[in-house]
Structures are given as C-alpha cells and as structure tokens.
Image (spheres, rainbow, N blue to C red):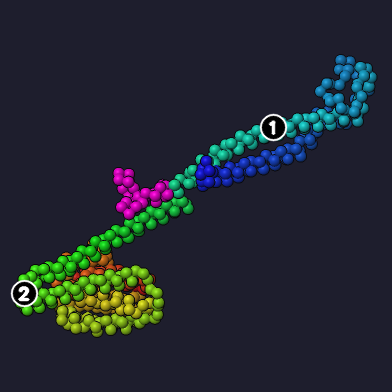
Amino acid sequence: MIRAVRSERARLTALYAGLLVLAGAVLTGVVYWLVREGLYSSISTAVTTAVPAQRLEDLPTGLPTGLPTALPTAVPSAVPASPAPTTGPWPLPGETLAITRTVSDAAESAALDRLLTVSVTVLACYAVLSVALAWWAAGRVLRPIAVITDTARRLSGENLLGVPPGQGPWGRIGLDAPPGELKRLADTFDGMLGRMEQLVSAQQRFAANAAHELRTPVAVQRAAAEIGLAGDPSPERVARIRSKLIEVADGSERIIEGLLLLAASDQGIRERRRVAVDGLARETAAALADEAAEREVDVVVRAGPLTVDGDPVLLERLLHNLVANGVRHNVRGGRVEVRTGPDGVEVANTGPAVDPATVPLLFEPFRRASARTHAPGEGAGLGLSIVDAIARAHGATATAAANAEGGGLTVTVRF
C-alpha cells in the first residue's frame, strides 16, 4: 500500500485530481456567487413586472365581488401586514410592497438552497470522475517510462538488445507516439542502446582479435623452443632459433605497445599545447625515407600551415601510422602524398585496390584490407585504429575512402 502511494502514478493522480477538483470548486463558488448577487434583482423585476407598483395605488378600496377574502397561505406569517378582513379595503401600497419583497426573499432563498445542493452533488460526482480520469491519464503518460524501465531491466552482458529470444528483432522501444518529450526520451534511449551494442561488439571483437594475435607468437615461440631446440642442436640451428624467437618477441612487443597506445588515446589528453602538425609531417616523412626507398615508394609532402592544440607524441604517432601504412601497403614504384592545411591532414597512397565496403572496418583493431601472411615487417592491424583513437582524443574525425584510380586508400583527419 505504501509502495502504491509512493509511486509516480499515484503522485500524478493526486496532482491531476487535486487540480481538477480545485478548478471545479472554484467554478462552483464563482457561479454560486454570481447567481446570488443577481438573483434577488431578477426575482424582484419579474414580480414587479407582473404586478406593477404604480397600478397598486390605483386599486379600489373595496374588494370586488368574487375575489378571495384573505391573503394566500403561501405568504409567510412573518409579513408585518395585518390579516385582511373579510370585507373592507385592499392592503395599502406599503403593505403590498412588503408582501412582494417577502415573496422575492423566499424565492431567492429556495433557489439558492436548491442551487447549492445541486452544485455540491455535482462537485462530488465530478471529484470521483476526476480521480478516475487522473489515474488513467497518469498511466498513459507514464507508459513510455515503464517501457523504458522494463527494457533497461532486461539488459545484460549476454543480451544487450534487451529482448528475450523470440520477443522482438531489435530490443528497441520504438515508441509509437506523437513528437514530444517522452518520444524524444524513448528515441534517445534507442540510440543509446544502438551505441552500446556497437561498443560492446567492438570490444568483444577487439578482445578476441587481441587474444588471437598474441596467441600466435606465443605458439611460435613454444614450437621453436620445443622442436627447434630439441635434442642436441647445432650452433647454427641455435642461432636461427634465437633469431626467430627475437623476431617473434619484437612482433609481440609491437602489438602490446599498440594496445597500450590505443588505450591511452581512448582515455583522452591530459595536457595540451600548440603543435605544428606541418612540421611533424615533414619529420615523419624524413624518418620513413629509408623504408620508402627500400620499397621503391615515393613520398611527397605538401605541408601547409596547420597548428593544433594537443599532445605532440600522439600527433606524431598519428602521422607516423598514416605514412607508414601508405608506404607498407603499396606497390613497387608507388606513391604516397601527404598534405596538411587549415582543414587537417590527408594521406593518399597508391597500391592494391580496396573494396569500398571494407573501408569503414579498417578503423577497427586488427582489421586488415587483406589476410595476414605473417611476413617480416607486417603490421598488427592496429595502425588505423590508433589513428582514429588519437583523432577522437583531439576532437577530430578520421575518414577513409578507396581510390577509384591507381588503387590504394586516402585517409583524411579533419580537426
């Protein structure tokens, strides 16, 4: 019982019903006051119109034959006029006016009593009806909130959509209502569920891919130790196994560093300062010049002025990943063009054709345009994921598009 009284529906019902009853009581009081103020004059006018006062003075002093010999019993005994004689003169004009006033007062009192009785009865019925309507209206108003509450209660890590099997395709509220505050609340909740679903799905894929990527080098190291060093290996064989273990350890270290950098980028920037991104672009291209020459890829920098408030280490990593991806995922004799300007950074490279449908997926961790071959120098698939995280940390957006001519990819970061 206490829980029902404390519910929002009970509070809204009390509020709505109270306002309706108060409005009804005020309306009843105003109507009663207005009728009371004008009722006497209306009755007096009606009586004097039916029996004009100026004609009373002209009445004869004797009673005409056939007229009643006494006043009607309807006139109260409190009238100060003396009883009319069986024979004799008519009542004086003053007495007649007193009778008229008494009749008007009696009619006014009876009408007001009747009006008050009817008004109170109607007001009581109106109060009962107001409570019922207020309870129904409160339920209608709170229905979307109840749906949102039930949907949120059904959410779980295994069932983020919030719908038991077989009870709905998407687990969204999908409130069918006219535009309003509750409609916007339900739509906002649906949007939040969609974003949560994407985030949880991305985290699950990230965890699975990270486990897979780290399990591979561990398996290689174990196989090299158990098989390659089994028995009495020769010094040359030990050297090869040692070189392989170091190479696998370096790959694992790069993956771990990428994961740590990705996590640090997602946490945001703690300290900002002015960074000349155009200067970083030139330094990055110079640092990767030897690798580009080895792969026979031409790197061209068109650095227009661009200054950003941010972390210089993260911004340098952003540019390094963009240029390194352009160099490594290219073809012999290919080209990488780096442009900076007031709008941001753009890195375009030639290379194998990229399916436009897979381009948005390249910003997810461990996603690659082609299957991994475990070739030396092959990345872990975290490059564009880190670029996207660093861009978001700086309030920027990273987008990519497949080149229609020459293959390859164009990545743009707009600040």
Q: Residue at x 40, y 54 (%)?
A: 189
Of the 4 image quadrants, the one containing the C terminus is bottom left
Estimate the x, y position of residue 65 in percent, counting from the top left.
89, 15
Residue 331 visible within the image: no
Q: Count all numbered tags in the image, as a single digit.
A: 2
Which residues make up the magenta segment?
Answer: 147-176
Q: Residue at x 5, y 73 (%)?
A: 232
Q: Which residue is drawn at 30% across and 45% down?
A: 165
Which residue is most to the top?
Answer: 66
Estimate the x, y position of residue 194 in percent, counting from the top left.
35, 56
Relative placement, left or right, of 154 versus 20 is left
Q: Mark 1 points at which residue?
A: 117
Estimate the x, y position of residue 122 in percent, counting from the top left.
64, 34
Residue 292 visible within the image: yes
User: Does residue 164 belong to the magenta stretch?
Assistant: yes
Q: Helix, strand or loop at disc 2?
A: loop
For marks 1 and 2, the one nearer the N-term is: 1
Q: What residue type is labelled 1?
A: Thr
Q: Mark 2 points at which residue?
A: 233
Relative placement, left or right, of 145 versus 404 is right
Q: Helix, strand or loop at disc 1?
A: helix
Image height of 94 relative to 208, above or below: above
Q: Give the class, few, some or many, for how many residues have Cα within 10 Å of label 2's Cα (few <14, many ≥20).
A: few
